Amino acid sequence: QKEVEQNSGPLSVPEGAIASLNCTYSDRGSQSFFWYRQYSGKSPELIMFIYSNGDKEDGRFTAQLNKASQYVSLLIRDSQPSDSATYLCAVNQNQGGKLIFGQGTELSVKP
Amino acid sequence: DGGITQSPKYLFRKEGQNVTLSCEQNLNHDAMYWYRQDPGQGLRLIYYSQIVNDFQKGDIAEGYSVSREKKESFPLTVTSAQKNPTAFYLCASSIRANYGYTFGSGTRLTVV
């Protein structure tokens, strides 16, 4: 079992729809959860982080965390073609002092 | 402005050569990291450092070496022992371990 798992996609949604990206993790001691967006050929940029169970909203983005079920998700409302990118989920390693990244989910928003 | 700078943006290496990738940050971050990304793949950790003069191997350290003599700098050397070095190399830093990372813009290394 991989430590952080994401569906690789591609996930295709029409413009204006809600895109839902999911991530599961194996380390029950993890406390910090991050979502990065990576455009093709560019470096990842941090778009959301969440530490507590529940929802955290920032503009069109909502991060959801459920520690009991060990999953974290990212919702993108009113998806735009400019949201087309790969989204990386990252989880802190409780005893390791570093983040563990999933493989990323490729999102394509069609006009 | 604070940030993390990688250079060069593109680098070409001949077979059997060692090359060094630069990573400098002025964010006053304690921790620094090197990742490799192959086309269509996720990030694989090469080395990381949580404090000056100390660093740990990541998942794919073979064929690579690092140093951390200054807080601001974490250079990566790709040695001739790395048999398949063509990849996109990303340096990152964080204020301390387990916090969110800030990434540099990356170095694209190609073997010619």
Image: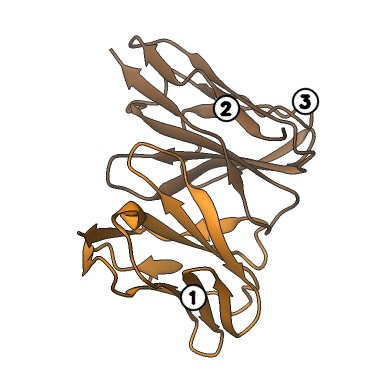
| Amino acid residing under circle 3 | Glu
- Please indicate whether residue A85 sits to the left or right of residue B7 in the image: left
Residue holding disc 2: B65
A19 vs A79, nearest the viewer: A79
Question: Residue at the location (48% across, 69% down)?
Answer: A61
Q: Is residue B24 above or below residue A63?
A: above
| Amino acid residing under circle 1 | Ser
Residue A62 location (% of width, % of height): 50, 74
For the C terminus of chain B, which image quadrant?
A: top left
Q: Which chain carries label 2?
A: B
Question: Residue at the location (66% across, 29% down)?
Answer: B74
| Amino acid residing under circle 2 | Ser
Q: Quadrant of residue B47?
A: top right
Q: What is the drawing colour of chain B?
A: brown
Instruction: Evaluate if marks 2 and 3 touch, with contact meaning CB atoms under 8 Å apart.
Output: no
Residue holding disc 3: B69
Q: Which chain does the orange colour mark?
A: A
Looking at the rendered structure, whether the residues under marks 2 and 3 are on a common chain is answered as yes
Question: Residue at the location (50% across, 82% down)?
Answer: A70
Residue holding disc 1: A26
Foreground: disc 1 or disc 2? 1
Q: Mark 1 lies on which chain?
A: A
Q: How far apart are marks 3 and 1 (CA)?
A: 35 Å
* Any part of residue A2 in sight: no
Q: Is residue B39 above or below residue B8?
A: below
Which secondary structure, mark 3?
A: loop
Residue A5 location (% of width, % of height): 38, 68
